[in-house]
Amino acid sequence: LAAKKHPDHRSRFAVQGVEFGGDLVPIFAGPNMVESEALIVETARSVKASGAHFLRGGAFKPLSFPYRSEKYTETREDGLAWLKIAREAAGIPIITEVMEERFVDAVADVADILQIGARNMQNFPLLTRVAKTGKPVMLKRHFGCSLRDWLGAAEYILIEGNPRVILCERGVATAHTHRSSSRFLLDLQVVPAAHEVTHLPVVTDPSHATFWRPWVKPMALASIAAGADGVMLEVHPDPDNAAVDPLQPIDFDAFGQLMDDMDAVAKAV
Ligand code: PEP
């Protein structure tokens, strides 16, 4: 179902009036975690004013370690409620992650797009359950999976009769873990590779791939040049004090500038 049937075959669909698979390059922007109502409302207003199409932010987070401090904790149902407030306050649709089958309905109640995180890419019961909501799904690529595995996972959503699947490349694992040699490697080559074999839109997430603020802009621009159908970016009002992964978000000004630069690259290619 994910396979291209002819060379020009590209899925085109709209989510809250934002078209995927056409000339527009939808941008998803926001903090890693929905930390507070004030933070998510402020961010929603700012990224919307800069031209973002979707507000991102996790209320449920696949955090690498189970230890929690007051600052470093999931906001869960509260976070979902704050996303809903931000959606109304700024007039911007929401993408947020769902990690467990038991929370699918609660997340779907708020989200315009349901995000499946990299770690859950092959959680097939979750994929099936999410597909059945009928909501669009962003399927992040697991950092250790091939394009074939990724498309296999997409089939689990498509086979339920849900055609609005967006693929998201978020960096693959490398042998190098030190920052100077990349934690993950943004697989830009998979963008044209995916376009060769599937009609589904392919977006990239330079923030999670690079894990390092100075590299986000070049990889975002390179994504557009590589033909990405969208870009997801972590944006935070005070990046150094972000509750999660403070090394990777960009601030509001940098995001506004990057929007202009991405636009220039999109026009040039
Ligand atoms: C995220 O987008 O918040 C996230 C956790 O991403 P990934 O699943 O790609 O690690």
Image (cartoon, helix red, strand yellow):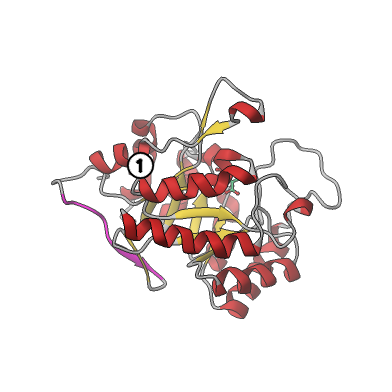
Magenta-highlighted residues: 8-15
Dominant SS type (magenta)? loop
Count of marks overlaid on the render: 1
Q: Is residue 229 left or right of residue 32?
A: left
Q: Residue 20's x, y, as percent?
A: 34, 61
Q: Nearer the viewer, residue 182 or 232?
A: 182
Q: Nearer the viewer, residue 123 or 231?
A: 231
Q: Residue furthest right?
A: 70
Q: Quadrant of residue 265?
A: bottom left
Q: Residue furthest top?
A: 175
Q: Residue at x 76, y 37 (%)?
A: 66
Q: Amino acid at mark 1?
A: Val
Q: Residue at x 23, y 42 (%)?
A: 3
Q: Quadrant of residue 68?
A: top right
| Residue 257 appears in view | yes
Q: Residue at x 47, y 59 (%)?
A: 261
Q: Nearer the viewer, residue 253 or 127?
A: 253
Mark 1: few/some/many CA within 10 Å (<14, 14-19, 20+): many
Element at label 1: helix
Q: Which residue is mark 1?
A: 191
Q: Nearer the viewer, residue 132 or 229?
A: 229
Q: Residue furthest left?
A: 6
